[in-house]
Image: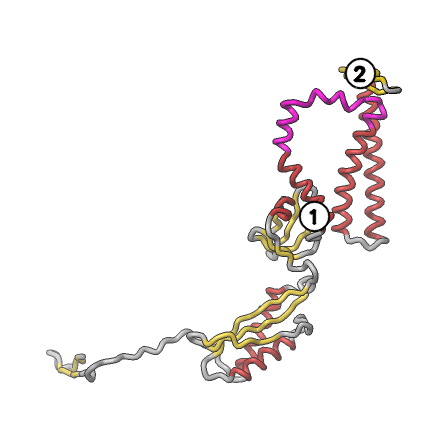
Amino acid sequence: MFSADDSVEINGQKVQATRSVTIGKSLGAILVLLIGYAASTALLRALRRLATGRLGVSEASANIWWRWSYVFVIALLVIFALNLVKIPLTVFAFLGGALAIGIGFGTQNLLKNLISGVMLLVERPLKVGDFVQVGGISGTVSSIGLRSSVVRAGDGIETLIPNSTFVESAVTNWTYSNRRIRRKIAIGVAYGSPPREVCNLLLAEAERHGVVLKEPPPRVLFSNFGADALEFELEYWLDIGEADSVLVASDLRHMIDGALAKAGIELPFPQRDVHLQQDEPLQIEVRRGPSGRAADSF
């Protein structure tokens, strides 16, 4: 098919040798690749089953390592097959020059994401199951792939995010060191309501909820004298891996509404007091119209 010159140094002297690539060698390399591919795939799958079944490794983590091991094994197989059939790597030197530069530019982003994926696996700033926020997207990391990772939002929408984004951008990992997060609910009650009683009532409802964590304990803050209400904030902690924060907030609002109604504490509505100031008393006259009916005049 084609040949290439390969130099070998023997006893301090360079010996020039010519190696040719024949159809037989090429078929032999393909055969080695196919056999190696089948054997390595079966071995990696067996190791993955062993890791998940006996070693207690999660399915998601096992899949991540399986993908990266698969790429590494395929690369080794290619090099091994070429050396086994005596095809030197120098025969591919003709692919250099302009073609290599073009491929380099075309695969720049791909290589950047691949390297970023390796950094994510080594440094582990995030892992499968973490709740992250990046670029305006919030959700749970469902998989970390070779080029991109998948973040699943609370509404079920899955977004593929390039791995380089997690390395180059600011990422908020809500579960980096632990899975506890703090949430809060704003409540307003009518003026004239006893603030201390409101605080105790809100705190009791939070402690009564079965999903709200006991430690750190919930707390209630008298946050402000609002335009229409006395404003309070109920702060509580959840285990994000076991609780749906949106559902818990809805449950607490139902519980608080019932408790306030039972205690006779009103929830306010927007209202305004209008004060009319006059330098002189307002004069009101009642006149009789042409039809004989009285007409008001101001």
Tag 2: amino acid:
Ser
Q: Is residue 215 above or below residue 169?
A: below
Q: Nearer the viewer, residue 8 or 126?
A: 8
Q: Secondary structure at mark 1?
A: helix
The secondary structure type at the circle numbered 2 is strand
Sequence-wise first label, 1 or 2:
2
Give the vertical position of 89 relative to 170 (above or below): above
| Residue 120 tag number | 1
Q: Which residues are magenta?
A: 81-107
In the displayed image of the protein, which residue is found farthest to the front? 12
Q: Look at the picture and state if 293 lies above or below 177.
A: below
Is 243 within the magenta?
no
Q: Quadrant of the C terminus?
A: bottom left
Quadrant in which residue 3 is drawn: top right
- Answer yes or no: is residue 262 visible: no
Please state the horizontal and vertical placement of residue 168, each as a whole percent of the image.
61, 46
**How is the rendered protein coloured?**
secondary structure
Mark 2 — residue? Answer: 20
Q: Residue at (85%, 41%) from the top-left corner?
A: 43
